[in-house]
Image (spheres, grey):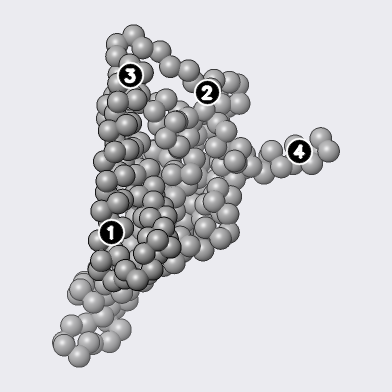
Amino acid sequence: MTAFARRHPSVNFIFFVFVLLLTMMTEHPAIVLISLFCAVSLTLLCVGGKRLLRQLRLIVPLMLFAAILNPLTSKLGETVLFQFPWGSVCTLEAVLFGAFSAIRLAAVLFWFVCWNSVVTSDKFLYLFGGVFPSLSLTLCMGLRFVPRLLSRMREVSQAQKCLLPDVKGLRHAGRVVSVTVTWALESALDTANSMKSRGYGLRGRTAYSPYRFGAHDGIALGWIVLFGAAALTGRFSGRFAFAFYPTLTGEHGISTVIYAACFGLLAAYPLISEGKEALSWRALR
């Protein structure tokens, strides 16, 4: 577990809200590149190198698809590179916007990978269980349903191969799906009965929580809110303005650099926190 993951759930949630909003709302390439670098670095810290490679096998094809699709479909832009056999032209601006779209898509996906690792189901229930008990429980169950379902399907498939090695093809797949769906329905009923017997969602019900908002959480929240608000100010004041069509135009003055640095300090907070803890640990040793 990283130092950032040990922060209070509200700190984790507010951080991801800031970085995701700014990444999706900004069209300045510098901001998106900073976001991608920080997201990949945090993903490496949270899930490790092997799982990062597995995520890359899914994300890279999506990036290629987004990068190739835009030049094929867009005719905007003034700098013509060549003409396709079907008569459409490929412009430099369309190619660059396709690459930008691919990078922004990858940054958002990597931030959600980090979200899934840091904001766990118990943190989500802690944040929203008191306000929206039914909705938060449903979302938590839905987020963990697909991985559990795939894992159970593999277990059932291996068991069926051991018990009935002669059954293959569609019959084998039908047995696996039938057993897995039956298990899922039974598990859902057991969970519903368990939560009902525990009084989940009743007014006045209290629940144990291991999370306490301390001084370090206050410092982290102040850092995130300060630089996040500064970056949002830069976004809404036009300092992150950038246009790909008809030609490349955008802000690049000193104020843009300052606001971009604020976003960089926001997005890099988990990395800074991890580095500070590593240095402290080395000093103590």
Q: Earlier in the sequence, mark 4 or mark 1?
A: 1
Outermost residue toward the bottom in this view? 85
The residue singled out by tag 4 in the image is 281
Mark 3 vs mark 4, foreground winner is 3
The residue singled out by tag 3 in the image is 197
Q: Quadrant of residue 233?
A: top left
The residue singled out by tag 2 in the image is 211
Residue at 23% x, 77% y is: 72
At label 3, which amino acid type do we have? Answer: Ser
Q: Position of residue 93 (x, y in %)?
A: 30, 72
| Residues marked 1 and 3 touching at CB (< 8 Å) | no
- Secondary structure of the residue carrying tag 1 is helix
The residue singled out by tag 1 in the image is 175
Give the alpha-carbon distance from disc 4 to disc 1, as whole Å: 53 Å
Q: Position of residue 238 (x, y in %)?
A: 34, 46
Q: Earlier in the sequence, mark 1 or mark 3?
A: 1
Q: Quadrant of residue 201?
A: top left
- Secondary structure of the residue carrying tag 2 is loop
Q: Is residue 152 visible?
A: yes
- Mark 3 is surrounded, within 10 Å at the Cα level, by few (under 14), some (14 to 19) or many (20 or more) other residues, namely few
- Secondary structure of the residue carrying tag 3 is helix
Q: Quadrant of residue 30?
A: bottom left
Q: Position of residue 35 (x, y in %)?
A: 46, 52
For the N terminus, give its image quadrant.
top right
